[in-house]
Amino acid sequence: MEKIRVGVFGVGRGLGLAENFMLLGAKVVAICEGHKERRETAMQRLDNTVVAYERFDDFIEHPMDVVILANNFYQHAPYAVKCFERNLHVYSECISNGTMGEGVELVRAFEKSESIYMLAENYPQMLCNLEMKRLADGGSLGKILYAEAEYNHPINAWDTNFTKGYQFYPKHWRHFLPKTYYITHSLGPIMHITGAIPKKVTAFAMFAPLPDDVPSAAYCADAAANITTFNDDGSVFRVTAFSRYGGHHNSVRICGDKGQIENLRGMGDQVMLRYNDWDKPEGEENQKLYTPTWCDVDEEIIQKTGHGGCDYITARIFFECVK
């Protein structure tokens, strides 16, 4: 079959995502980026057949099959709708919508289309999270009662290189982002592992404004947010959305009525599997600390790609759907 043609809207994060599609055999045919320096840098990494646009309405007319949406975090829904109107497949770098109203509009437009849509949350495909899903699906943990996850990503407020790269104009969305909004990296994995869907939610934010004179001072002064959900299967989740307290980590814990498994903060992909003596499966230990293995035909590629390989796996899932 002919190569799948990919267009990229927003090349800061988007080009890295597109390179995973290229590894899978797709061809990038067009990019759209309003920031001149980013547009020029992207074109240096792509071949000379790629067409660069500044305006989305011009870009969307280019012949292509798939659009990667990696524009401003909270502005994906209106552009996804425009893609659906042309039956283009959409790979939406989180989040999908900024308001509930946009969510309704997004779903209605999708249902009228022939498009495939993916909210491209990548953290469920991390090695430790895939291992936790394997155990949960296998049933040895029993009925899942509780799960928790934290996405803690502190940033040096005095790091001007980071500011230039990620918050490159005064009213960039990162300056305004409430910590409760960036929840997919913690909620996504435990929804994927357990299959539970939140039905009720409560949240508290922790107020800790940055000093006024730091380069990355923000308009939003919460440093962390703790969110609890009651789910459709009777289980409860506790998640910490994008937060900036000391000690960088991404952690997940899954608790069933027969056992529990978690990755250990600061220990990479290592997981701790624990059972009570009367519930442990035959041949298992009460407690086991180990590093899971990939067991994936693309392991060599996975280990060379972004976010511990989960960018590639997420792209592969979408790519197979499109094919």
Image (spheres, grey):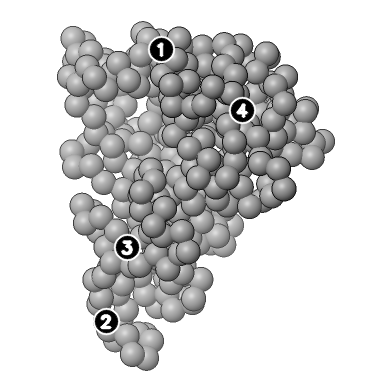
Residue 194 seen in render: yes
Residue, x 24% and y 25% (percent of image)?
A: 208
Type of amino acid under label 1: Glu
- Crowd rating for badge 1 (residues with CA inside 10 Å; few <14, some 14–19, many 20+): few
Disc 2 from disc 3: Cα separation: 14 Å
- Between disc 1 and disc 3, whose residue precedes? 1
- Crowd rating for badge 2 (residues with CA inside 10 Å; few <14, some 14–19, many 20+): some
- Between disc 2 and disc 4, whose residue precedes? 4
In the figure, 73 relative to 136: above or below? above
Where's residue 114, x and y in %? Answer: 79, 40
Relative to 1, 19 lies left or right: left
Residue, x 25% and y 77% (percent of image)?
A: 287
Where's residue 151, x and y in %? Answer: 34, 43
Disc 2 from disc 4: Cα separation: 54 Å
Q: Nearer the viewer, mark 2 or mark 1?
A: 1
Q: Which residue in the protein does label 4 denote?
A: 29
Where's residue 294, x and y in %? Answer: 39, 64
Disc 2 from disc 1: Cα separation: 55 Å
- Between disc 2 and disc 3, whose residue precedes? 3
Disc 3 from disc 4: Cα separation: 42 Å
Q: What secondary structure is found at the residue carrying circle 3? A: strand
Q: Which residue in the protein does label 3 denote?
A: 262
Residue 149 seen in render: no
Disc 4 from disc 1: Cα separation: 19 Å
Q: What secondary structure is found at the residue carrying circle 4? A: strand
Q: Which residue in the protein does label 1 denote?
A: 37
Q: Nearer the viewer, residue 211 or 316?
A: 316
Disc 1 from disc 3: Cα separation: 42 Å
Q: Nearer the viewer, mark 2 or mark 4?
A: 4
Which mark, residue 286? 2
Relative to 19, 286 lies left or right: left
